[in-house]
Amino acid sequence: MTPEALAPSDALPDTLVDVAVIGGGAAGLNGALMLARSRRSVVVIDSGDPRNAPAEGIHGLLGNESTPPGEYLERGRAEVRQYGGLIVQGEVASARADEPSADGDLRFAVALADGRTLTARRLLIATGARDALPQIPGLAQHWGRGLVHCPFCHGYEVRDRAIGVLATRPMSLHQALMFRALSEDLTVFATDGLEIDAATRERFEALGITLIEAPIEEIVADEAGGIAGVRLAGGEVVAREVLTTATELSPCLDGLEELGLALEDLPAGMGQKIATGSAGATEVPGVWVAGNAADPAAQVGASAAGGALAGGHIHGMLVMADADAAVTAHRARTAA
């Protein structure tokens, strides 16, 4: 998605808002929707670069099957605006805890790359995750098309085709079994140093999975720009139409370093995510995380659900903060 696809952008308010949502994907928009419907002032800051932008459609989300990601997000932005939420096009340059209010309520200062600033009482981080691909020449250009990673997101669309699994880590061996359920024509390319135990080899043999243990030189494209095959170090090209690989994941934290969000390792060397507790709350007071930044494996539906849960939790915490402030003011009035 290009920044122009987000136009028109709402104006960034110069007054205090209840919640700034950083990230305008499914998680951020659904969190904003929950907050706006609770009559909270909420601003979504969206850079317009969703993780699933290369995909042709969303899958596995009831009521939205095969909906293009851009169309889904456009509808989501309209729904947030319907309840008074603002969608602001921009990139966050910094976000940090600011001086609290006179009554002790939290404040956060958010600065955009173009110099605009915003002050919010709470933050919802929904910036998503990055996928680091194996460094194989010719591979990255096929990401989201001929190169896929999730059997639930893309599996049905590549069913019965010649699939190649670039096995870079132990998780890739399970990934191969998942894609074998979708096609009988499966070849696993094991990278140097990947240990394959006897039980896995036996499973592969029983399922008719071809295992190639040789260095890969490059991914070969066909005349139409799709995948033609995998060239091995000796020059042989193994014909494949589709490739899949397990990526190394990391949360998008550009501009958020000052918040001091804790990270935790994902299992099987898959990367890292932001550590969260109940409803996406973090160890940093006033900051919640939803979507792929907190759960990189979450599909669109799960990300949206996580955003809704976080949005509801934030509203609940603000309700208590507002009630406490009202009690303090009431006591001051009655004591005068």
Image (spheres, rainbow, N blue to C red):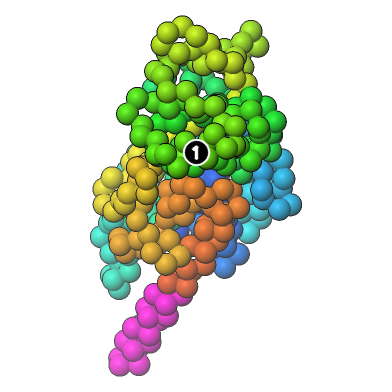
Element at badge 1? helix
The boundaries of the magenta stretch are 319-336
Dividing the picture into quarters, in which one does residue 216 lie?
A: top left
Q: Nearer the viewer, residue 21 or 152?
A: 152
Which residue lies at the image location 47% right of the left edge and 36% below the top edge? Answer: 201
User: How many numbered callouts?
Assistant: 1
Q: Position of residue 11 (x, y in %)?
A: 52, 44
Tell me what residue is drawn at x 47 percent, y 73 percent.
316
Q: Residue at x 25, y 60 (%)?
A: 99
**Residue 165 position within the rendered picture, expressed as x and y whole percent measured from the top left:** 52, 29
Magenta segment includes 321: yes
User: Could you say which quadrant of the image residue 205 lies in?
Assistant: top right
- Measured along the vertical axis of the image, is residue 316 above or below residue 123? below
Point out residue 10 in the picture as x, y percentages from the top left corner: 55, 44
Q: Position of residue 144 (x, y in %)?
A: 57, 30
Q: Return the residue at label 1.
A: 202
Please check the rendered image and state whether residue 312 is part of the magenta-colored stretch, yes or no: no
Q: Quadrant of the N terminus?
A: top right
Q: Is residue 46 above or below residue 41?
A: above
Task: Determine if residue 89 is in view.
Answer: no
Q: The disc labelled 1 sits on which kind of residue? A: Glu
Answer whether residue 301 is visible to the viewer in this image. Answer: yes
Q: Is residue 47 above or below residue 140?
A: below
Residue 301 as seen in the image, left or right of residue 66: left
> Nearest the camera: 121 or 250?
250
Bin the neighbour count of mark 1 within 10 Å (Cα to Cα): few under 14, some 14-19, many 20 and up.
few
